[in-house]
Amino acid sequence: MQWMRDRDLLVEDTLAFVQRLAANKPAWIETPTRVEQPIAVASEQTAKPRDRIFEREEILQRVADFRANQRKFQREREEHYKSTMAEVRWPMRQVSNTHEDCVPVLRTFARVNDERPPYAVS
């Protein structure tokens, strides 16, 4: 298999390359002699109480916007449901008494809506 041979050659070349680099330059880890002290935080960078009030107001505004969007989506879903159900129920209202095969549909319609259509067969 050609790909296995190519893989083995690549591994050998990579190993030889790494060994050449290691031989030319010894690995050496430098340790710092002095540890730097952490920099003190300037008072300008800390949040002021006034800034926190603005942040709180911004958060409250975002929450209110989110809730408004959710109410809008809920209204749209309800309108879509109502229009879809009206389209589904419309053909059942158009059925006349002459169709004997529609009697089960009319009975189902009457049970679902708690009303009996005037053309329903009992």
Image: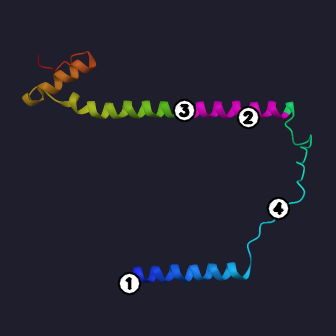
Q: Tell me residue 113's x, y (percent).
A: 27, 19
Residue holding disc 3: 70
Residue holding disc 2: 58
Q: Residues within 10 Å of mark 1 (few under 14, many from 20)?
A: few
Residue sitting at x 88%, y 54%? 35
Tell me the chief SS of the magenta region. helix
Residue sitting at x 57%, y 79%? 15
Query: Mark 4: which amino acid?
Result: Thr
Residue sitting at x 51%, y 78%? 11
- Extent of the magenta region: 51-72
Query: Mark 3: which amino acid?
Result: Gln
Q: Tell me residue 64's x, y (percent).
A: 64, 30
For the residues labelled 2 and 4, the Cα–Cα distance comes to 47 Å
For the residues labelled 4 and 1, the Cα–Cα distance comes to 47 Å
Residue sitting at x 87%, y 42%? 45
Q: Looking at the image, tell me whether mark 3 or mark 2 is earlier in sequence order.
A: 2
- Above or below — where is 104 with respect to 7? above
Residue holding disc 4: 31
